[in-house]
Structure formats: structure tokens, C-alpha cells
């Protein structure tokens, strides 16, 4: 019986976002679109009404604390009642969506699915999806902790109403959000228009899927500060520097399909991986070429110039470790200085010192299970209320399989996963998303849990 | 469960008939003459069965979005509550129903008073009391959160107990405020007042059971349950409280010095969580139903082995003994209703 139920657990999406961020627009679209799925929606302040194939039920956000000695373990009593009743019906729903009020903390909703056996048996928390009003959210960052909590909890973030804001502003906002929550998938939307499969059944809480953390998200501070997209004909160009603050700088130049910002984002992700690898030293006067390589340009002699050899006309993205203006650097063609058709800055935004951040840890090696348990237990005990989400893949000493885990505040769910593959490096990757996290302290603490060889 | 572990000759469970409803059986209620059983399913309709044949003598429309609770009085009036926010009083003979406003989007529970003259209902943060004619007599003030359960004091039609997050409230209908409060900062699910009035027990979301000794308001908390506790049943002598909250049935002995510090009886036969418990109205037998689709008959205090086990085809959702204790109706998640003969 248990096994039969396992396959039929209904995925639940929790929808959060401030008033005016577009939750209702998204819900209405989901309810009226012809997707052939039966969706039950738990909303605030609505009566129970059937809309053709759908059902909308009103909830009353009744949050209470569980008496298990855990100060942050709050759950939603109304959801236990409403969903318990819903799951009795034979005409099961394909999906359940729970809309929270604008000011709600998503924590209790998520924890309900961990804390109640019936919920856990019949439903599976699929994702927390947060809508962000790109135009107004900045006003709320400072005065409403709820906004940052909603972002911190999210598996999917819809940066909505991007049509009302300059693209460069959206870029900055996205960088800031990425800094808070490095694990979420971020989509830019207008009128909350997005393919349903990006919202439903995304597997944010699924140990099988969510924990294959994309390594590029593990370090939200990009290893480069600037990128520029140039349209270049085949031929020779020059990357010229005046005297600057550093004796060397890493750079990479990558071909891109066109000058679209989506293409630049794709190139950015490739560049992140390149920058994490070994750099090829290049002396002043030598040349670089557009390929999957990161170069270390020698600037120790002060003023310097490097050739750029382009064999094919097209669009190219140049990524630099530092801002070009720090060196008065520029790309020159035969007719002189060239301006990029698009520029992007990736430096951490020091204007905003957000309390909520992501700390990613990626360390090869095996963990001493006893030390790791003691360390994690201590963190959860002391910082549980400040840690919103936690996910990871671990390599435990003496185990042939990966160990995957995730948590919400102090609640923790983990289990052995697939075996490590032949030749695969045994690496630990984990991410903490929370308030007042000490990156250095967490890294140091984790390193100390590695088994001595 | 090996056959030899079933206590021999002390009792049995035989199937008299079986019927099928459209959906999950939410509640079962026997008429006071024991001739009919009403069964509510989660899709809404209420079926009235002839207890001896299993024939459906009447099908009532029930409540849109599901009927949650049923109660008969001694004059054959059936009260029902549902997720349409209504309480309904049915003349089962004609199938006519009178609709009352429960006071919120959904009504959780309805119960006739022991004398059959009054009805109590709970919806959202309030409880309401009605005359059996349908006239609203009284409404409580707001509880601190949604009322999870409400019961009449056994043998009294003037005393009520309600449970909600934060504890219990005792009421004398007429006053907007409770006459007494038993405070506890936790989420309550089910309340059960012992037949002698001495104890009130609650089952909790926190996998605990609480007892209050009504005379002085002292409370006891019982830990160690595997899951939340929604199943509570007192025996008629008020000695044993049977509780679910896991695969095992835990029975507290409230005789003598009471359950404090005592070791409970543990009844083991179910292989999955117990979903429903009922004691006979006068006898010593306890009936349990589990997620494993088993119905088990027990006699706690005499033996810890089941007297009889009956495999059904689906998880049990609710069960109820007949007024003469000789039959029990068992409702299941797949919509089946089984009539068992208890010997």
C-alpha cells in the first residue's frame, strides 16, 4: 500500500510574492489555460468554488508552533485540514498550488510537508515559486524582511514586470537576487507569462533532482567583473591597456550566436566554468583567440597591448577579471577604438549589503561522518531560524554512494543516492541560503569535517 | 499476524454484508433503534442503510464538496455537516432536509446532545448550538484558532467541551465566554470526555495525548507516539482510554491511581497506522481499523492479542458499534461499508 501511494504523491507548488507582484495573474492563467491538468488552488480569502476542472479553496493562514523543542518549527494547521480533506477524494488532482499572502513567511508552509505524516505520504512539496515585482521590489528590500525571506526560500523566481524597468536595472536586480539565493532558477517575465512546466513539477524539493546543483551557481560572486559584446569582422584587433592597479588580469573571449542578452548569459555560464580552471599566461605583445580558454594577461610592465585574432566575422563576448576602465583598456580595430554593442557588470553590488546570502561550498574529498554530524547539528541548533534552505551532495568516508540532503530551517531530510561513478571525483557540494551567514566560518567548519587521509 | 496469536473463542468478527459508496467514507452513524446506519462520503451524499440487509433505503443529497460529520437523535432526526458551510437536519423518511448556516465556509462537526433536544456544530473559530427544530440558540465567542473538535459532556445536555490550538474550553451554552479553560500551547485534533465525566483526553498534532482531571484541572501529557493522534476511545467504565497515533494501540489505565507514571497496554496487530478506534457502548470490546486494511477486535485488560482479525480490501477510515454492541459498521477509504457481526 505504501509503495502504491509513493507513485501517486501529488506535487504541491507554493506561490509566494508581495502584493502586486503578479501572483493572481499567474494563478488565473494557470486556471484558465487549456493544459489538461486538474489543479486545486488553495487561496487566501476565497470561498470554495469549482472552476470546470479546477477547484479553488479558501485558506486562513493558521500558523502554529510544533512542540518538539524546536523554536522555528511552525506549520500551517489550516493546510493540514484542507489538504487532508482534499486527498480523500477519489478524483485526485494532478497538482496543488498554495498561494500565500503577500506578507507570509513561506517557512511554515514548507515545514508542514515535512512535519505531518499524512501530508508527507500523500503529497510532495515540489517547489516554492516566488514572484518579484521588478519595478517596486527595491523599495521593499529594506523595510520588509518578508521579501528577502520569500526570495531566500524560492526554488523558482519570476522576475515579473520586466517590461516596466530598464534592462540594466533588471540586470542589477537579478544580480542582487542571485547573491541572496544562488540555487533558484530565475526567469524574467512580463504579465507572469511563463511555460507551465517551469512552474509546475520542477522538483525543487525532490532529492533526486534538486540536488544536482549546477556548479556555476555554487559561487554567486562571478569570477569576472565585466563583459562586453562586440561585433567583429575577421581580422586582427588589439586589446590595449594603460598602467593599472594589478600586475595581471584574467580574460576570455567567446563567440556568441548574436548580440542578444540571452546569448550573453549562456556565454557567462561557460565563462564561469572556464575561469574556475587553469589560466594560460600571455605576455604583452602576444595574441589571444576566441576559444574556450581563459588567459592571464601579463600587465606587470605597465602599459601593454595584446592581439585578438578573429578568423570569422561574428559576435564575441569578452570577459575580464577587472573593470577595463581601471586600466583604461579598450579594444581597437584598424579604425581605432571599438565600443561594445552591449556591456554587463558582474561585480558584487556593494551598495546593498543584504543580510540574506547564499554560501556555497565545493570541496573534494571524503567527510568524517561523526565530525560532519556534530558540525551540522551545531549549526542547525544555533542558526536554524536564520537558515532558510540548505541542499547538498556529500561524499561520506567509507560509502560507495553519494549522500544527498536538503533542509528547511532545522528540518533535515537526507538519504543515500546513486553510487559514485567510475572515475568521478568524489566531491562535496552544498549550499546554505540564510541570514547573517559567515562564508569564511562555514567553509572553515566544513573543511574541518574532511576525513584525514 | 500468525493465526495462533489470535485469542481463541473469546470473540469474533463476521461479515454480514458489504456495500459500496462513491468515495471515501468520512463518517458513520447508527440510529438509536439500531435499525439503520447513515454513511457520509467525501463526495457529498449520505446513504441510509438497512442495518440487517445492507439495502440503501434512502440516499440524501448531503453537502456539496463533502459531508464531514453525522449524528442521529433519539427521534430519528439525522444532522449532518459539510464543506458547503451548512448544517442540515434530515427527515430520513421523506428525504427532506432543513438547511442551517454553519457560520463559515465549512462545518467540521455536528453532534446531538445526549437528550436529543439540541445540536452543536463547529465551524472556523466558533461553535453554535441549535434546537432540534433548527432554531439557533447560542453562538460561542471566538476561539484562539479553528475549533478542531466539540463534544457534549456524557449524560449532560448543558455542558460542552471544545478543543482548538491552545487547549480546551468548557462551555455552558448561553454565555459567550467559556466557564473554564484548560490551557496547553499545542495543536489539538480530537477530544474525548470519559463517560464518568472525570477525565477529558485530547489527541495532538504533536504526537502526544493529554489528560485533564476535570475536578482540579491538573493535566498529564503522554509522549512517545509515532504520529499525530486522532483516534481516542473510552471504555464504558471510564477505566481504559484506547489511543492510536501509530501502528500499535496504546491503552491507558485510568482506574486506581490513574494513568500518571503507569505503563500503558500495547496492542499490536496492525502493520500500518491505526486510523479508527471504537469501544462498545456497554461491553469490554474495542474495535480498531488501520491503514493496512485490517479490522481487529480486542479486549484490553484481559489479553493483548486480538480476539479476531478481519482483512478488508482498503484502509479503514471510520467505524461505529451498533447501540446493542452486536454489530459494527466499518467505513473504508475506497468507499466500501462493511457490516461486521461482533460475537
Image (spheres, rainbow, N blue to C red):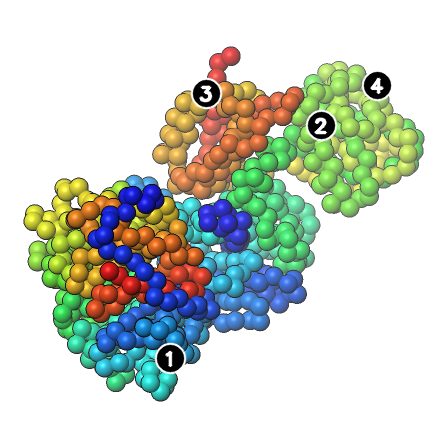
Both marks 2 and 4 on one chain: yes
Kindly identify which numbered label has been placed on residue A285. 4
Q: Is mark 4 on a helix, strand or loop?
A: loop
Which quadrant of the view contains residue A241?
A: top right
Determine the secondary structure under disc 2: helix
Q: In front: A365, or B59?
A: B59
Query: Which residue is pictured at 40% across the width and 39% down the height?
Result: A410
Look at the numbered discs 3 and 2 and tell me whether their residues touch, using CB distance below 8 Å: no
Q: Quadrant of residue A33?
A: bottom right
Which disc, if any, is residue B31? none
Crowding at dot 2, Cα within 10 Å, few <14 / some 14-19 / many 20+, comes out as: some
Q: Report the Cα–Cα distance between label 3 and label 4.
A: 50 Å
At mark 3, the secondary structure is loop
Structural distance between the alpha carbons of marks 1 and 4: 99 Å
Question: Pointer 2 indicates a residue of which chain?
Answer: A
For the residues marked 2 and 4, what is the alpha-carbon distance in whole angstroms? Answer: 23 Å
Residue A368: image tag: 3
Is label 1 in contact with label 4 (beta carbons under 8 Å)?
A: no
Amino acid at each position: 500500500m505504501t509503495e502504491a501511494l509513493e507513485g501517486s504523491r501529488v506535487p504541491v507548488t507554493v506561490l509566494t510574492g508581495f502584493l502586486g507582484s503578479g501572483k493572481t495573474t499567474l494563478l488565473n492563467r494557470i486556471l484558465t489555460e487549456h493544459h489538461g491538468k486538474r489543479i486545486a488552488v488553495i487561496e487566501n480569502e476565497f470561498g470554495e468554488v469549482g472552476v470546470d476542472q479546477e477547484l479553488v479553496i479558501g485558506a486562513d493562514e493558521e500558523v502554529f508552533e510544533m512542540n518538539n523543542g524546536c523554536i522555528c518549527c511552525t506549520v500551517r494547521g489550516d493546510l493540514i485540514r484542507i489538504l487532508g480533506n482534499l486527498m480523500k477524494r477519489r478524483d485526485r488532482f494532478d497538482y496543488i498550488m498554495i498561494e500565500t499572502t503577500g506578507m507570509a513567511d513561506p517557512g511554515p508552509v514548507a515545514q508542514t510537508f515535512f512535519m505531518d505524516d499524512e501530508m508527507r505520504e500523500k503529497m510532495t512539496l515540489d517547489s516554492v515559486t516566488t514572484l518579484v515585482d521588478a519595478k517596486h521590489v527595491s523599495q521593499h528590500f529594506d523595510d520588509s524582511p518578508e521579501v528577502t525571506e520569500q526570495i531566500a526560500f524560492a526554488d523558482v523566481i519570476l522576475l515579473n514586470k520586466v517590461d516596466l524597468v530598464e534592462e540594466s536595472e533588471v540586470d542589477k536586480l537579478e544580480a542582487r537576487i542571485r547573491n541572496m539565493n544562488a540555487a533558484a532558477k530565475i526567469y524574467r517575465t512580463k504579465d507572469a507569462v511563463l511555460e507551465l512546466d517551469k512552474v509546475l513539477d520542477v522538483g525543487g524539493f525532490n532529492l533526486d533532482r534538486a540536488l544536482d546543483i549546477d556548479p556555476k551557481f555554487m559561487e554567486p560572486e562571478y569570477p569576472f567583473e565585466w563583459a562586453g559584446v562586440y561585433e567583429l569582422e575577421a581580422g586582427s584587433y588589439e586589446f590595449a591597456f594603460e598602467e593599472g592597479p594589478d600586475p595581471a588580469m584574467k580574460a576570455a573571449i567567446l563567440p556568441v550566436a548574436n548580440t542578444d542578452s540571452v546569448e550573453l548569459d549562456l556565454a557567462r555560464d561557460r565563462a564561469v566554468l572556464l575561469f574556475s580552471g587553469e589560466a594560460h599566461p600571455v605576455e604583452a605583445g602576444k595574441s589571444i583567440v576566441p576559444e574556450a580558454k581563459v588567459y592571464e594577461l601579463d600587465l606587470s610592465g605597465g602599459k601593454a597591448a595584446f592581439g585578438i585574432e578573429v578568423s570569422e566575422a561574428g559576435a564575441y563576448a569578452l570577459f575580464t577579471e577587472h573593470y577595463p576602465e581601471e586600466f583604461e583598456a579598450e579594444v581597437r580595430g584598424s579604425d581605432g577604438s571599438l565600443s561594445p554593442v552591449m556591456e554587463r557588470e558582474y561585480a558584487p553590488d556593494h551598495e546593498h549589503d543584504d543580510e540574506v546570502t547564499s554560501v556555497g561550498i565545493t570541496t573534494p574529498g571524503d567527510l568524517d561522518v561523526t565530525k560532519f554530524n556534530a558540525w551540522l547539528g551545531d549549526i542547525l541548533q544555533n542558526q536554524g531560524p536564520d537558515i532558510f534552505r540548505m541542499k547538498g551532495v556529500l561524499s561520506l568516508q567509507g560509502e560507495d554512494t553519494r549522500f544527498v540532503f536538503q533542509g528547511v530551517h532545522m528540518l533535515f531530510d537526507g538519504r543515500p543516492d546513486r553510487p559514485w561513478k567510475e572515475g568521478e571525483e568524489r566531491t562535496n557540494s552544498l549550499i546554505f541560503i540564510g541570514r547573517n551567514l559567515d562564508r569564511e566560518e562555514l567553509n572553515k567548519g566544513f573543511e574541518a569535517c574532511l576525513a584525514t587521509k | 499476524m500468525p493465526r495462533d496469536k489470535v485469542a481463541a473463542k473469546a470473540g469474533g468478527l463476521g461479515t454480514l454484508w458489504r456495500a459500496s459508496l462513491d468515495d471515501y467514507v468520512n463518517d458513520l452513524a447508527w440510529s438509536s433503534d439500531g435499525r439503520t446506519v447513515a454513511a457520509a462520503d467525501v463526495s457529498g451524499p449520505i446513504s441510509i442503510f438497512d442495518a440487517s440487509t445492507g439495502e440503501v433505503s434512502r440516499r440524501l443529497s448531503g453537502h456539496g464538496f463533502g459531508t464531514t460529520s453525522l449524528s442521529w437523535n433519539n427521534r430519528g432526526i439525522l444532522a449532518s455537516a459539510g464543506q458547503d458551510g451548512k448544517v442540515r437536519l434530515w427527515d430520513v423518511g421523506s428525504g427532506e432536509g432543513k438547511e442551517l448556516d454553519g457560520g463559515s465556509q465549512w462545518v467540521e462537526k455536528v453532534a446531538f446532545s445526549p437528550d436529543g433536544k439540541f445540536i452543536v456544530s463547529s465551524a472556523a473559530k466558533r461553535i453554535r448550538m441549535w434546537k432540534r427544530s433548527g432554531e439557533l440558540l447560542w453562538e460561542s465567542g471566538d476561539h484562539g484558532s479553528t475549533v478542531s473538535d466539540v463534544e457534549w459532556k456524557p449524560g449532560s445536555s448543558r455542558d460542552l467541551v471544545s478543543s482548538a490550538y491552545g487547549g480546551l474550553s468548557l462551555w455552558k451554552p448561553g454565555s459567550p465566554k467559556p466557564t473554564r479553560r484548560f490551557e496547553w500551547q499545542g495543536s489539538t485534533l480530537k477530544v474525548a470526555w470519559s463517560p464518568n465525566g472525570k477525565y477529558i483526553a485530547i489527541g495532538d498534532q504533536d504526537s502526544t495525548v493529554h489528560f485533564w482531571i476535570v475536578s482540579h484541572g491538573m493535566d498529564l501529557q503522554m509522549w512517545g507516539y509515532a504520529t499525530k493522534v486522532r483516534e481516542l476511545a473510552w471504555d464504558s467504565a471510564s477505566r481504559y482510554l484506547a489511543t492510536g497515533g501509530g501502528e500499535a494501540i496504546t491503552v491507558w489505565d485510568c482506574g486506581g491511581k490513574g494513568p500518571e507514571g503507569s505503563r500503558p497496554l500495547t496492542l499490536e496487530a496492525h502493520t500500518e497506522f491505526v486510523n479508527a478506534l471504537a469501544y462498545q457502548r456497554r461491553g469490554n470490546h474495542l474495535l480498531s481499523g488501520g491503514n493496512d486494511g485490517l479490522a481487529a477486535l480486542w479486549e484490553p485488560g484481559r489479553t493483548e492479542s486480538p480476539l479476531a482479525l478481519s482483512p478488508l480490501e482498503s484502509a479503514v477510515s471510520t467505524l461505529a458499534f451498533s447501540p446493542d454492541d452486536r454489530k459494527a459498521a466499518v467505513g473504508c477509504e475506497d468507499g466500501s461499508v462493511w457490516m461486521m457481526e461482533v460475537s
